Image: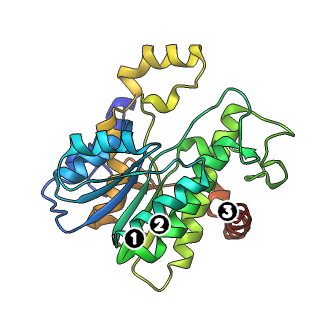
Amino acid sequence: MSLIQHLMSNGPSGFGYGSTAEEVTAGLSLAGKCILVTGCNSGLGLEALRVLSLRGARVVGTARTVEKARAACADAGGAAVPLACELSEPASVRACVAAVIEQRIRLDAIICNAGIMALPRLEKGHGFELQFFTNHIGHFILVTGLLPQLTENGRVVMLSSAAHAMAPRAGIEFDNLAGEKSYSAWGAYGQSKLANMLFAGELARRFAGTTKTANAVHPGVISTNLGRHMNPIAVASMALFGPLFLKDAAQGAATGIYAAVHAGAANISGAYFADCNVAKARADAYDAQLAGRLWEVSEKIAAQ
């Protein structure tokens, strides 16, 4: 089988690499459902907002500012609820949680889509490396705060990445969460994405005995503004080879939406999805001891 044939073939779910968000929700009514999507104003989050709204869901769309969230929600139409949620600022995240609770919004799914990628130089947020703090701690505060708002069959979907394989050999460098001992753009990004997977896995274990689920997904390699910090050579390579190998936003949003709303994923928890099918991550992504330690450390950071 050629590479192109492999990429275009579908897996056991009936979907695959080329499937779009509209295709994985075709014929599905989400009327009466409410789904929170972070980073709703661009890229995969914007496509998720559009398609979920198209299928009748009420979407709580969050962005770094309420103005950006309002603009995205207005374009989506329907009953979308715009909220600010700057993941690198715990006060903003907690205000978002408080707003959801105050409005008595029950959530059928939370899609943790927003993030930053491959910062060329070490940047910090509240004393921690910024990618780890934004991509993991921000979502950790958000999701744990919203757990009481999840419905009986609520689903949590963490957008991870195949780049989790670029995390340090130790998995999570607990002695270097500030990034001061060593820093690499992709190593730090990989660590944050591995943290997303470990968080989903630990959450799935805590959901055991319920009908709630938590999973991590790899959306694919997509040309969105998430890569705005990448070096010029990498950007030029993406521009050259993109038409052959990159997914567009419609394809990139498919796996997260599949995990969040499709019946085929309803009874799957603690898994890693890619191309709308369960996939295999690196071994330590399933390490319960590592995940438990990360949860404890994350709680301490969140409490600061």
Q: CA distance from mark 3 to mark 1?
A: 21 Å
Q: Position of residue 40 (x, y in %)?
A: 37, 45
Q: Position of residue 264 (x, y in %)?
A: 29, 65
Q: Nearer the viewer, residue 183 or 40?
A: 40
Q: Is residue 17 visible?
A: no
How many numbered marks are there?
3
Q: Quadrant of the N terminus?
A: top left
Q: Which element carries disc 3, helix, strand or loop?
A: helix
Residue found at x 60% / y 55%: 90
Give amino acid for label 3.
Answer: Ala
Q: Which residue is mark 1?
A: 102
Give amino acid for label 1.
Answer: Glu
Q: Which element carries disc 2, helix, strand or loop?
A: helix
Q: Is residue 260 visible?
A: yes
Q: Quadrant of the C terminus?
A: bottom right
Q: Are marks 3 and 1 in contact (CB under 8 Å)?
A: no
Asked where in the image residue 72 lies, by quadrant, the reply is top left
Q: Position of residue 61 (x, y in %)?
A: 35, 51
Report the disc number at residue 302: 3
Q: CA distance from mark 2 to mark 1?
A: 6 Å
Report the disc number at residue 98: 2
The nearer-to-camera label among 3 and 2 is 2
